[in-house]
Image: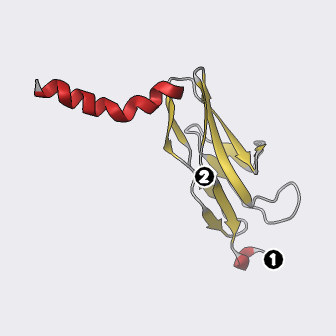
Amino acid sequence: PPGSRALILNLAPLRVWCFSELVFIKEPQDITVTRKDPVVLDCQAHGEVPIKVTWLKNGAKVSENKRIQVLSNGSLYISEVEGKRGEQYDEGFYQCLAMNRHGAILSQKAHLTLSKGGSS
């Protein structure tokens, strides 16, 4: 019957979920910001809950603090982007790592760049 054929076609894109049971709905994108500006890097994963989201900057785990927080939807919020060298230097490549009991998926890299105008 025509209905059963449509069902098979509709299920085809879902095959990827069977592999890790996780898929990104939103991934972080490259962004250029001015120093002291707030920024949100998007990350939203779909799959069996609970899903734990961890953020990486240049391959190392991002530590949350009063300035940097992982939001309940998985996105990374930086209240005030810093341009100083050292610990609070926010420029770099960010990735979102989503995990559940079936496995883990790593997002594409998003480059956070500080605009030249704001780096005094």
Q: Quadrant of residue 82?
A: bottom right
Instruction: Report the residue that reaches farthest toward the top.
Output: 101
The first of marks 2 and 1 along the sequence is: 2
> Residue drawn 71% across and 79% down?
117
Disc marking residue 39: none
**Does residue 57 sit above or below 31 in this rendering?**
above
> Residue drawn 59% across and 39% down?
74
Q: Secondary structure at mark 1?
A: loop
* Number of the front mark, 2 or 1: 2
Q: x, y (%) of residue 12?
A: 33, 32
> Residue drawn 72% across and 48% down?
68
Residue type marked 2? Leu
**Label 2 close to label 1 by CB (< 8 Å):** no
- Residue at the disc numbered 1: 120
Q: x, y (%) of residue 18?
A: 46, 25
Crowding at label 2, few (<14), some or many (≥20) Cα neighbours within 10 Å? Answer: many
Left or right position of 85 against 70: right
- Residue at the disc numbered 2: 41
Instruction: Report the residue that reaches farthest toward the left.
Output: 1
Give the quarter of the figure containing the C terminus.
bottom right
Cα distance in 3D space between marks 2 and 1: 24 Å
Residue type marked 1? Ser
**Does residue 55 sit above or below 37 in this rendering?**
above
Nearest the eye: 55 or 83: 55
Q: Secondary structure at mark 2?
A: strand
Q: x, y (%) of residue 4?
A: 18, 24
Crowding at label 1, few (<14), some or many (≥20) Cα neighbours within 10 Å? Answer: few
Nearest the eye: 97 or 42: 97
> Residue drawn 10% across and 23% down?
1
Q: x, y (%) of residue 66?
A: 76, 46
